[in-house]
Image: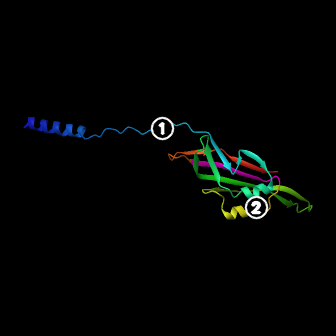
Amino acid sequence: MKIFIIIVLLLASTNLYAQKPKPAKPTGFVKFKVPKLTTSLGSFKDTMYIAPQMADSMIGLVLKVTDAKNVVYSISSYQFLYKKIVTTEDEKTGKTSKTSSIKSSLFKTSPLPNLWLNAVRENLTAGEEFFFFAVTVKDPQGRLMYAPDLKLILK
């Protein structure tokens, strides 16, 4: 009887060890070389000075990100900041002075929505700025990456 109990215990314990699954190999991060990207709006790239009349026509264009081989990357999201020159009045003295006001938002489509286009085109003056930043794009394999910022200053 003792031999029977020992055999049953041995068989039971070997089954416990036989049931353990092998640990799966982790799928690690695959390194790739990020290409040099360029952000453009029409023919404008990097930081540029433009006339207010030109800004009026080009602000409605599509924001585009390409690499050196002219591969177009799809935009996942970007932030747009509009620095507007406004006039304020000192309540005590009644004197007016120029200052700036900032409007900014996150967008997932390009060009900008009509509401924003109308607000920007309302009264363009020298010294105002358009700033496209935190531009994230997807390559054809679906990998996310940041693209360079684009800043346009009205002269």
Residue 120 falls in which quadrant of the image?
Answer: bottom right
Magenta-drawn stretch contains 129: yes
The answer to whether residue 4 is left or right of residue 98 is left
Q: Nearer the viewer, residue 124 or 103?
A: 124
Q: Which mark is residue 30?
A: 1
Magenta range is 126-137
Question: Which tag, 1 or 2, sits closer to the chain's start?
Answer: 1
Q: Is residue 110 visible?
A: yes
In this picture, residue 142 sits left or right of residue 19: right
User: Quarter of the image containing the N terminus?
Assistant: top left
Q: Position of residue 106 (x, y in %)?
A: 64, 56
The amino acid beneath tag 1 is: Val
> Depth check: 110 or 30 in front?
110
Image quadrant assignment for residue 52:
bottom right
Q: Position of residue 86 (x, y in %)?
A: 82, 59
Residue at image location 60% in from the left, 44% down from the top: 70
Amino acid found under the numbered disc labelled 2: Arg
